Amino acid sequence: MFSTYGALIGLAIAIFLIVRKVTPAYALVFGALAGGLIGGGGLVGTVEAMIGGTKTMMPSVLRILASGVLVGALVKTGSAAKIAEAIVSGLGTRFALGAVALATMIVCAVGVFIDISVITVAPVALAVGRKANIPVPALLLAMIGGGKAGNIVSPNPNTIAAADAFKVDLTSLMFANAIPAVCALVVTMLLSMWMARRLSGKGVPAGVEVEVPVALPKLGQAVAGPLAVVLLLALRPICGVTVDPLIALPFGGIVSVLVCGKGRDTVAFAEFGLSKVTCVAILLIGTGTIAGIVKGSALNADMISLLQALHLPTVALAPASGVLMAAATASTTAGATIASQTFSGALLAAGIPALASAAMIHAGATVADSLPHGSFFHATGGSVFMSVRERLGLIPYEIAVGLTSTIVAVVM
């Protein structure tokens, strides 16, 4: 229905608006409208494609809203902070950077969004960084890299969106990227340690206030909720009983609240979690509009033709689309969603298995998802009181971590 250049111009307009600080959801909607009209779909056809794109997002939106119960419970009960503190304390200052990276990976992997994971681990990381005289950039790189590793094996919005687009089991997609996640974690540790040596002598500045969380639950209480989610999602591969994430994620949140003795605060914690996932759900709706235009354009065929002209296999479409779409939107969730919705048909038609395609797109969406026109860039920098200039210097290292998991996912 739409031309390739129309779809690309629509994406470019959306990116421009996001860079100009327009709310991403509105930027994507306006970009989709402009792209459809420029692409020759007409007003009626453009609106129909946009609405059709948002309809495909609804299963993901429902599951993401349900995940707010788990997010709120893990953050407000202190479970996420306790898990991070236990890992860092257990490994000690000698392995501080590895502990910080591992802690962020696990916190993100159990269902906390990557930006919230970094913000949650940051106080613990700064405290151990001050004690071990570790520079702030190395600490933040460890947290971001660990978060990227955990994000591709988590029941987070990006994983849910990719699983829904390819109609694969969420648990299977989480486990599919386990080895790429471990490889990304190892590279994160190596890069952060190298950076710490390069910036030797520049520890956490004295002006940075370090507030270590207090009154945290016991470790057994902290892991109860995530463990409940994992067990429920694992029933399908183990014994063929399917428990949808729409049920498993809020159930894990309720378990976490009850085990931590915070049952009276369940509603308040759920409201907090909802406030954190609402923006993601709205972003996904906006993403659906642009995905509807791109999916209805000739971009699929033209991308495959380009790969053939470059003598690249069609399988390269999966990681490349994840990288490009996430870079365009500066969002793992938006990038994975647009790439999955747009190119799922072409990848499946080429004979590439759905699970493999989803895993490669998902890993690719973590390469350049932290560019300055997205909120993750600013939220993570702010968590450790880092200047924009210093934060920009970490982007090449973050890309290296994302490329590691993507290359390993493609090889597998």
Image: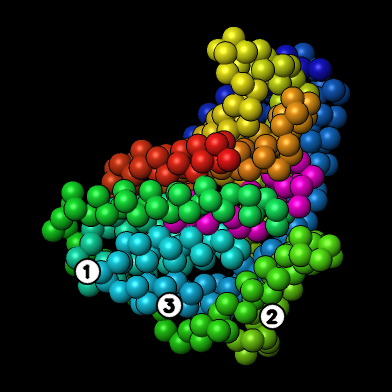
- Badge 2 amino acid: Val
Dot 3: few (<14), some (14–19), or many (≥20) neighbours within 10 Å?
Answer: some
- Badge 1 amino acid: Ala
The residue under label 3 is 86
Q: Quadrant of the C terminus?
A: top right
- Residue 224 screen position, x and y as percent: 62, 79
The residue under label 2 is 255
Q: Of helix, strand and loop, which mostly describes the magenta segment?
A: helix
SS at badge 1: helix
On screen, residue 143 above or below 191: below
On screen, residue 362 above or below 145: above
Q: Residue furthest top?
A: 309
Say if residue 119 shows up in the picture.
no
Magenta-tinted stretch:
146-169
Q: Residue furthest bottom?
A: 261
Q: Is residue 194 magenta?
A: no
The residue under label 1 is 132
